[in-house]
Amino acid sequence: MARQFSVRRQTGFTAIAMICFFALYLPIGVLVIYAFNAGTSLSVWEGFSLRWFVKAFENQQVIEASIRSLQIAVVAALVATAAATMAALATTRTEPYRGLTLKYAFINQPLMIPEIVTAVALLIFFSRIKVWTGYSGLGYLIAAHTAFCIPFAYLPIRARLENMDLTLERAAADLYATPWKTFRYVTLPLLWPGILAGLMLAFVISLDDVVITEFVKSAGQDTLPTYMLGQLRRAITPEMNAISTLFLLLSICIVTVFFFVNKKRI
Amino acid sequence: MADLNAVEIRNVSKIFGFGEFAFAAVNDTSVAIRQNEFFTLLGPSGCGKTTLLRLIAGFEFPTSGEILLNGENIAAMPPFKRPVNTVFQSYALFPHMTVAENIGFGLQMLGRPKAEIQARVAEMLKLVRMEELRGRRTSQISGGQQQRVALARALAPQPKVLLLDEPLSALDYKLRKDMQIELKRLQAETGITFIFVTHDQEEALTMSDRVAVMSAGRILQVGSPREIYDAPTDRFVADFIGETNFLKGRVVSAANGVADVDTGVAGRIAAALPQGFAPDGEVTVVLRPEHAMLCAPEAAGECQMTGTLENVVYFGTDTHYHVLLSDGVTPFTLREQNKPLQAARFAQGDKVGISLEANAARVLRN
Amino acid sequence: MSEAAKVIEAEARRDVRNRWLLSMPALLIILLAAVGPLLIVVVYSFLTPGPYGDVQWQPTLSGWINVFLERDIFDETLSLADAHISIFVRSVWLSLVTTVLTLLVGFPTAYFIATRPDNSRELWLFLITIPFWTNLLIRTFAILQIIRNEGLINNIMIKLGLFASPVQMLFTDGAILTGMVYVYLPLMVLPLYASMEKLDFRLLEAGYDLYATPFQVLRRIIVPLVKPGIIAGSILVFIPALGAYVTPSILGGGKNLMLGNLIELQFGQGRNWPLGAALSITLMLIVMVALLFYVRNAKGSGAKHG
């Protein structure tokens, strides 16, 4: 008998989806496997070994770059999330007022322009400031990262805010809560999963950034991605596989946490 | 040659889930629906009526059994090959198309020429009186209008059978009443077999040629509205439709389709027997409240049964009397139509007598 | 105006003012570190290149002219800068093809996820999200490993005897395309999925009830209703692809430049900041045109927003 009819089925879609998932994970899988390669080749398997991980952990530049990445990411994510939370509160659940669409476009601007354009703009802008002030520390990178992290933090917070039940806040007001108290005891706790999601998103986006960081950084200010970019352009060793694998592991951990936070929807 | 039945369900079962979670939405059910009839599936929610409808439409496949359409077994046919159309409970109008486009969709899918589609759409719009709204998006019209568009859309391809899944449940009272008349008229005019699903017994009784009462995946009784109401053969049917009195008794004798039943506190009652049913032990007799009358208080001793009046409820058109029979246990309800400006005859606590109309009592199968 | 109306109006004004105050931090940061600098780029595009990079404060149009034209060094005549034009064309072309390919693969994938039963759907979403959050570099590097001459594909093909010697796949337009499709695929799937999640599958039933075949249901019901997702996904792929820099750099080598590489060149070896600035603005303009196209399409669809 012919296969039973299903309203949702479309021919070939499942097959393509499976190929898609396979194709997405194959390259990454290969990369991870060869991180454990005993030999120096990137394609000939010579046995299992952890030497490349050891080498990565001993690599001074890698360690420095990683620390710098984390420093920037932590600060940028925190500041961006705080700013985004305030911006979300300011732009949601309101009748359209003058300048609202403009504000919305402004906040999401980093998403609408190719990274390289922003990178060029910041390069030019900061180089001029460097000449004027002589300062060339991490500040520029942190500022740049914070800016493009804001829309990424903004979106999940806004989404959560829009889905929140307004009547809860009205109930609080009815029970003598001032606007601040309402925010602190009702809005904020309910908003918290969204804020966490925004924070994690901002953190990962900052960690991952390559283009803007590459343009804005001064010499010697490598983050992990820019270090890797430099290496990729020169000599490729399995050490890169090891570093990539560790980075991948970090991403997976964060995504998993993100999923659990999102699940816990009150 | 006898007319082929429009739809025939033969021992169809539909089981969802498996192992310990399996449950039969439709349980070994059989029914034959005739050409050109307004047939209603009536039952409480969860009884399987919608599942049965979906089986006919092709969105579910029977776990066992056959489904015949005009004699042809369609169990393996996908829905887009069956000449059957559905009016969905949620209407399921395409939001990205106008009213006219929705109505013409079926014919378009069948590849009919443009001119024919246009003509038919115009015809349908006229039929449901929606001509001015033909260019509107379906999200911009009212619920009642959406319902009519859904109807027109399903009728446009001239299906052999039209399935209606509780189409009036979202409408307000007045609109629903109007649509009931409308649907009845359409069915008579088009001659298409309508299979109508509802949980509203009033709807079923007023609109249908025949009604099938369903419960827990089974069809308990099929018959005309009058048969269902006056002659229920199943306990559930008797209970679900209207109000009923249940009296337990013992068959003393039976002849010519009538049983003489000794019900104890309610005396000896002559109750009609269902066809082919010849019990001889304990049975249940049913009697509708409107087929009983309160005896005059003076003649209380000569009535069929006696009891104490527990409650009198005034309903405008009639009055309900809730009586506790003389055994102090059995309840009995009577309904009497109110005459104009008639003073209340009885009050709570009165001792009353009850007499029954002839030929009103029936014996249940179970 | 009555007293009550005055109070309400004052409240409304205070509310708007509060909202402006709240959004200040975000707006300021973005103004200083994202939008503001763009204006400076415009200024720089009209200046003269300095000898060691940076600029000299002399206004000139040479930056803009050099975007599309080049001056012959011998007789000073202007002619079309073939190199630049071909880079523009390659960038737009590769971005379009990437968008189309990601759509063709991403649509069934998103549909697949959207039609999974509730309990396994989370898993599939999780699986598609991980590549999305994996560093761009890592993903590009992974593709590099596969298509190199000593990479996976060549190794397998040689082992199977299908190739006699390694086939050069790296440093071609095809390599860039493969890399970009791989990198941007999750960006197409996610908005598509968001649209499909909201699809009322009862409408599909209605379609089938009215004699539509599965393909007709796809074409006439699913696709139109999912259009907002298609457009969002296309934009999310096309715009970054147009400005791609890392992927073409690693997979295309120095020969197959895309617009991003060309721009970077001006700030590196090329030492022509004004040209780089002009090219960036040009890129931005192309993007704005694409966005305008999106906005118009999204409004014109009339269907509910996905």
Image (spheres, coloured by chain):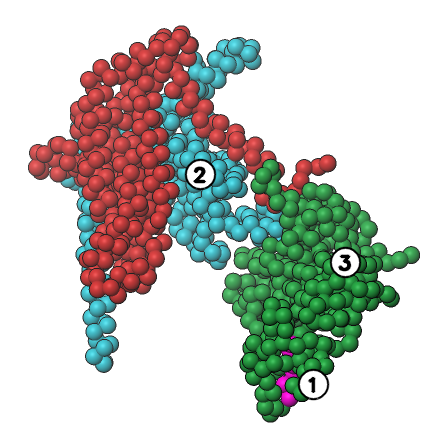
Asked if residue B335 is among those painted magenta in the image, a careful observer would answer yes
Viewer-proximal residue, B356 or A30?
A: B356
Determine which residue is flagged by label 3: B281
User: Which residues are drawn in magenta?
Assistant: B334-339
Q: Residue at x 89, y 58 (%)?
A: B2
Which residue is denoted by mark 1 in the rendering? B299
Q: Residue furthest bottom?
A: B341
Q: Secondary structure at mark 2?
A: helix
Image coordinates of residue B288 in percent, x first then y, are: 69, 72
Same chain letter for marks 3 and 2 = no
Above or below residue B172? Residue A134 is above
Residue found 65% across the figure and 56% down from its top: B215
At 47% from the left and 56% from the top, the residue drawn is C304
Location of mark 2 (residue): C122
Q: What's the colour of chain B in the image?
A: green
Q: Colour of chain C?
A: cyan
The red one among the chains is: A
**In whole angstroms, how far apart are the C-alphas of marks 3 and 1?**
32 Å
In the rendered image of this protein, does residue B53 appear above or below residue C156?
A: below
Is residue C54 highlighted in magenta? no
Q: Identify the residue shown where x is 56% and y is 32%.
A: A15
Q: In this rendered view, identify the residue nearer to me: B39 or B18.
A: B18
* Mark 3 surroundings within 10 Å by alpha-carbon count, few (fewer than 14), some (14 through 19), many (20 or more): few
Horizontal placement of B144 versus A150: left or right? right
Amino acid type, residue under disc 3 in the picture: Gly
- Image location of residue B257, percent across then percent down: 84, 65
Label 3 sits on a secondary structure element that is loop
